[in-house]
Structures are given as C-alpha cells and as structure tokens.
Amino acid sequence: MALVNNAKPAWQMPNMVTNVKSVEAFPVSYQEPTDHNRFRSVCLVKITDEDGRVGWGECCTYFPEATLAAAKLVEGLAEIVVGQNILHTQTIWRKLHEHSWWYGTGAGLTSIAISGIDIALWDLKGKALNVSVLELLGGPAHEKMPAIASLHGTKETIEEMAEEIAAHTATGLHGAKVGFGKLGKANLGFEHDRDVEFVRKVSEAMGPDKMLMVDLGVKNSWDISTAITRARAFEELGVYWLEEPLGHDDPQGYAALRATSGIRIAYGEREWNAAGVKRIADTGTVDVIGLDPGRVGGISGFVKAAEICNLARRQANAHNFSTAIVGAASQALSWSNPACKLLELQPVYGPAQADLVDKPIWHENGYVPMPTGPGLGIEINEDLVASALMDN
C-alpha cells in the first residue's frame, strides 16, 4: 500500500508566516582601507518579525549627510512596513515606491532607503523559510563565479601600484578593476602617457591571463576627444573595459566613443532603478552596466534591472564596494542572474567586511562560492554596529 505524505512544505507552514514587528535604522561610520583609509558611512537596516527573527539590509550612502538622511527616511517608511506579511517583499517594495511619489518615486535617497529595507526583508524571508536568498531568486544561473579585485590606484609610483595589484591577483583573482582620480599620489586619469604606462606595467605584472578594468573617478573629467584617445590606447593594451570615461550620463558622447573604439564601455551604477537602466541600455552605448543593490532598489530592484541587461544582452555587474551586507546580497544576485559574469571583491578587508558578519564573502582560488545558509547566509555582529553608530 502506498504511503501518503501529508506534510506541508516549509513555505506553506503557518508558523513560518508572520508579520513585521519593527524596522530600525543604524547610521554607521567606518574606515575603508581600500579607499585610502578614509571614513565612509552607510545606513544599516534591521527588520524583526513577530517571532523574533531578524533580517539585515544596507543603504549604500557613503557620505555622512546622506546616511543620516537615509536613516530618517527608513524610520519614516517603517510604518508602511510594520504589520506586513514578511513573505510579501514585492508588495511592500511597491507600496514604498507608491508612498514616496512626491519625494522620490524610486529615485535619489528614496531609492537608497528602500534598498536597505528591501535587502533586509529578503534576508528575513529566507530565514523564515530556512532557504537562501539564492534559492528564493530561483537558483544558480552559473557553474562558477569568477572574482576580480576592485581597488583604487593611490601610490606615487607606477611600479609600486603594479606590484601591489599583481600581489592581489596572484591569490587567484582573475584580474583587477582600478579606480583613477582617487585620494593619494597616483595622479591617474590626468596624463595620457602616465595612464598608458600604468596600464602597460600593471598588465605585465599581473600576467597575460588577467583582466584589467579602468574606472574613471569623479575627479577626472574627460572630454570626448580625450576619452577617444585613451580608449584607443587602452584597447590596444587589452584593457577589458573602460568605466565611466564620460561620467554617468552623456549618451551623445558615449555614442561618439562607441563609433571610434571597440573597447567595452561600462557605466550605470549611478542609476536609481530599472527604468534608468533601460534608458541607457536602449542607447546602445554601454556593454557592462553597474548595479548597486544598496542603491538601485535593493534585491527586488536589482533583479528588475539585471533582467533588462539580460534581455538587451548586456553584462550586469554588481557594484560590490561597501559592507559585507551588500557583499552577501551581491553574491546571491550575481549567482542568480545570467547577465552577471563576475563579482568584484575588495582585496583588503576592514571591519565593515571582515568583522561585521560571521562569514565574510571571499573567493577560493579566484572563484566566489555559491551562497549557503538561510537568507543572506550571514549573522551580524551587533556589538560592532553599536560601536560604529554616528551621532544622529
């Protein structure tokens, strides 16, 4: 006689489905070794359900005034979230956008605040159902996830920087993305000959099997002619992509650059939502679109934007340059979407990456492992959060 199993799957079990009890904002400040040890700040979000389970998210704000503003927005938006079913992430995400119709509608600081809430809700939902966020997103789209180093050029001599970057990639990382125009004495992005020498020596030091990406900073302001000249030189030297050579929003300039160089062009990480990502994808001027889950509407917003990239046959790339919370979200999102081809890792971790969570995201011989554990798969060091709080 056949046995009938009447047990309900975990996601149908009534005791797993509870409502949000509280939403808390924690504006914190920390030193970032990969950014010349300057102080950065973000707003962390903690959401607790009626059974005491906790999910954590992050508003990727970077600057103290934006962090404090995001904290106030999270606190104000909390009344929309409290009492909602913890499984209804899409419904809550939509309600938050509808509520903010006058002061954001999914853009600006509103998007950053919603991002932190949304990431925390996905973490909480995964913990309630005892499944990972990757499983909630439909499972892996890749067999492997290559990792690269993401850092800034800061030292005075090119030789020093080449040695440093090559040491990072020697751990197995598949290449490096280097930010120009940052703090320190590197003076990158201002002189053609120095930039070309930098690319040549770093490429030689890393070896022929490593990728080099160049990321222009906000202190660099290239005109179209300069961007074309650099792009052609970098293309000859094998630069894998050139990021934001004309800033974040110059469709005509990028069209001119596209017409004169075959180098991959990357931008998009300063867009707020899927609509902005579609706008730049439709211009045909971008190959790699950066997406920050702590800015683009959280996990829900990232999924919508990455699907646009996938449909447009553009590469999506998580802007994973913040704390371990955004790192864990970026890991799950990158594994789940076919448009994501690699994951950036800061090669030197500070407390925000190494000590904030019990299992920091890292690589194994150049590959980021598939995320495991319920939710984002991490537990937060709340003592560290308390010690890093900003004056509110």
Image (cartoon, rainbow, N blue to C red):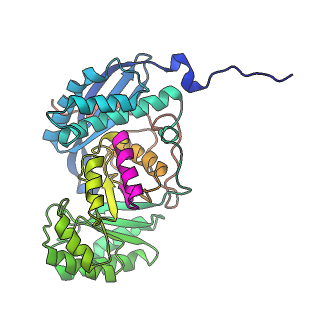
228 over 316 or under it: above or below: below
Q: Nearer the viewer, residue 316 or 256?
A: 256
Q: Is residue 46 visible?
A: yes
Specify the quadrant of the image occupied by residue 53: top left
Q: Is residue 18 left or right of residue 266?
A: right
Residue ID at (83%, 24%): 2
- Where the N terminus falls, by quadrant? top right
Please name the residue shown 22% across and 69% down the image: 254
Residue at 41% x, 56% y: name it.
311
Q: Most extreme residue toward the right, as rendered?
A: 1
Q: Work out which quarter of the rendered image holds the C terminus and state it.
A: top left
Q: Residue at x 23, y 52 (%)?
A: 270
- The reply to whether residue 195 is visible in this rendering is no
Q: Position of residue 370 (x, y in %)?
A: 53, 48
Residue 87 on the magenta span: no
Q: Quadrant of residue 109?
A: top left
- How many discs appear? 0
* Dominant secondary structure (helix, strand or loop) of the stretch shown in magenta: helix
Q: Please provide percent x and percent y for residue 160.
A: 29, 73
Q: Image check: 75 left or right of 56? A: left
Residue 311 is a magenta residue: yes
77 is higher (above) or lower (below) than 63:
above
Q: Nearer the viewer, residue 321 or 263?
A: 263
In the rendered image, residue 169, in percent from the top left (x then y), is placed at 42, 67
Q: Is residue 70 above or below residue 161?
A: above
Residue 321 versus residue 241 in the image, above or below: above
Q: Which residues are magenta?
A: 300-317
